[in-house]
Amino acid sequence: MGLSILVLLLIGAAVLAVVLSHADAGVVGVVVSVATALVTPLITAIAVQLWRRRSWAELDLAAALAVAGDDLAEAVRRQWEPAVLERRLRGPIPVRWAWSTRPVTGRVDEAVGPGDGLGIDRLEPLPGTARLTAEAVQAGGLPELFAVYAGLSSGRTVVLGDPGSGKSAAAILILLEALQHRRRLDAGTRQQVPVPVLLTLHTWNPHRDSLRDWLARRISGDFRFLRDAKYGPDVAARLIRDNRIALFLDGFDEMVPQYRAAALEALDDQVDLRLMLFSRSEQYSEAVRGRHLRGAAALELRPVPAVEAARYLARWQVADPPPPWRRLIEQLETTPDGPLARALASPLTVTLVRDTFPEPAELDELLVPGRFSTPAEVEDHLLDRVLPAAYRQRPGQPPARYDLSYARRWLAHLATEMARRDVKELAWWRMHQWAPAWPRVVVTTLLGGAGAAVTAAVIAWLTEDFGERDTIDPGPAAVVGLLLGAAIGLAQERRESPVSGLTGFRGSRFSPAMGLVSALAAGIATVLTVGPMLGPSGLAVGVVAAVAAGTMTGFMARTGTQRGTEALPPQAGITGTLGAGLTRGLPAGFATGVPVGLATGVPAGLVFGTSAGLTTGLVIGLTFVLAFGLVDGFATVATRVAAPLDPASGWRQDRRRSLAVGGVFGATVGLAAGITDAMAMIRHDPFVVAAVVGLVTAVAVGGALAVAAALAVSTTWRTAVFFLQLRARGNGPVQGMAFLADAHRRGVLRVVGSAYQFRHARLQDRLARDAPGAGPNP
């Protein structure tokens, strides 16, 4: 195959040489420009891959992997420690567990014994812990769950429970205890202990993705700093392969029902990773009808006894509680079989009582004889109190930003849309999927057309009296702007991005935003430069340059070759950050700059001489290298924060980075446009005239392209327009993210990684069930 390609290339080169020997300079310029525009990106791609391999070959991958594991452990700790305070898990409700009586696993000895014949690996206890016995897994409390995780021979634990039984809280507390245990060990021993990572399972499709592929993608996506080249290639996959990860998988019951059995089979087959799986009891029992998790210890969280609920609530009161609290505590202690006591058998309802009765006198409504006949009625009543308690007027504080009635309607709409899609996480970068895409595309298209028309009009108005030059009329410019706006709008709708940056199509390694802006910039610059030299043929050169530059830049934007900014010291400042960003973005810069430089410089050299060709090619090419290198570097540079961003921080980071990318792109490409315009005019006009025209062009074009680039890479723009759609329908405020952040501060929502969740799934279900119809906005 290689010899055949070589022969064909030689034959093609010979034929091309014969043709060019009989052609005039114009034809030679077109052919050479097209050929170089096509070939140089391929050479750049090969060079980038060689560069990457050389960089990684110089790494001590084992040492880098150890550093990655320690950095990941610190990031996980930072991710989940705030949840302890947010969910008030210090001094948790004393939940007990016992070996499940459900038919969901094998015998106890298969979990704690040698497991002969099971076909799964036996794990040694973690350093500093003891191997678990059969007696130790029969029953215990939350503190004993860490011992199960650390010392179970099979390494497989399933924690079951009813809704609101405290599974997620248990997962967080065990995870943090495991991290603390790992942190206390010396450096050498610590490398023998896997890093526990807590993930939710609802995004996994086991029919499409293997467990390891999904894990690697999730870990790499949630902890983006692991993409830094200092850790080596595919670090998440290597951590998993070397058993440096322990899995805490929550939300098995939130998976698509058709996926659960396949997911359980895949989990059973992976055999060598320490695993804790958390699920509602009923859904897990249904999934194991086909195949169970061999060797797993199945532990079920037990209801909270009424006396324990009473003691817990008493600890939150003063030594002599107000009379309503005393009456409530006494009823729990004296009537453990009543509807109220049975309703408070879950940590969820106990915490609702703790948090939703700011006025003690309101507790008497729970104690009215005969008011509640079932625990479900008590639970519904407590859930209905969440929003009034959250949005009440607090003494000494300004009035709530959002009225309770509007907040209830908007939150109910969110809950309804989430229920319709069977999701529990409220990811702001996916919310646009709830409304038709065409209004957002239309808005972006019209903005592009208006911006281009205004830019053309400004340039024509300011430069019409300067020298001999033709300017683009606002009409044709508007058409180009409309096309650009439509392309940006359509590309945005195809993009999937939990964090800011120039992201790719779902399931691809191509960055459409970078490819689009590169193609447009390369094509326009080439046509404006070589058009006067080559006539209609200049359009062909521009199209080829655009396709070559756009295609290669789209791929190069995904392959930053150097370390990101988190490798810089904090005092590096803007200069160091710019330098690191440019270094990281060089592949994308060369992928655009080289084709443009050659496509403009070669024709100029053939028509005006070698000096003119070199000057034109170098000035334009290097400017584009700088422009796209900085854009891609800013957009793909690794985050300084070694932890997943919360939703509000992710939103702000995306907005800031989009503005930074737009500013850098507008400044550099505007400079290139100004220089190109000035160089074209200086051949027949004085230097001062050419300089003024170039300055006007640089400012006008740079400003317009800054906006275009910022929109092209922005995820917040797409979501912001979606919030306008919600507003028009009466289902949400214009400042949607501010509303969500406010709901989080009030305890209605909680943060899970970079997304929000309702405080509990039961609250989401309750709001969705009672969602009112949309009405007028305030």
Image (spheres, rainbow, N blue to C red):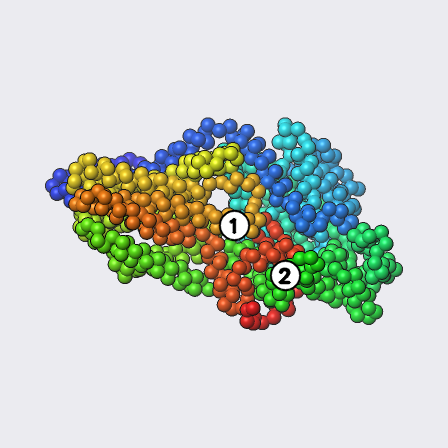
Residue placed farthest to the right in the image?
A: 334
Image position of 638 with respect to 54: above or below: below
Q: Secondary structure at mark 2?
A: loop
Q: Residues within 10 Å of mark 2 (few under 14, many from 20)?
A: few
- How far separated are the C-alphas under marks 1 and 2? 23 Å
Q: Quarter of the image containing the C terminus? A: bottom right
Amino acid type assigned to the residue bearing label 1 in the image: Arg
Q: Taking 653 as reference, is 665 left or right?
A: left
Answer with mark 1 or mark 2, whichever residue precedes in sequence.
2
Which residue in the structure is indicated by mark 1? 652
Q: Nearer the viewer, residue 422 or 295?
A: 422
Where residue 755 appears, as percent x and y from the top left, is: 57, 52
**Where's residue 499, x and y in %?**
50, 48
In this rendered view, identify the residue nearer to me: 217 or 597: 597
Q: Is residue 87 above or below residue 589?
A: below
**Camera-side mark, 1 or 2:** 2
What residue appears at the point 76 percent right and 50 percent down from the top-left corner?
93
Residue identified by numbered label 2? 400
Left or right: residue 637 versus residue 627 is right
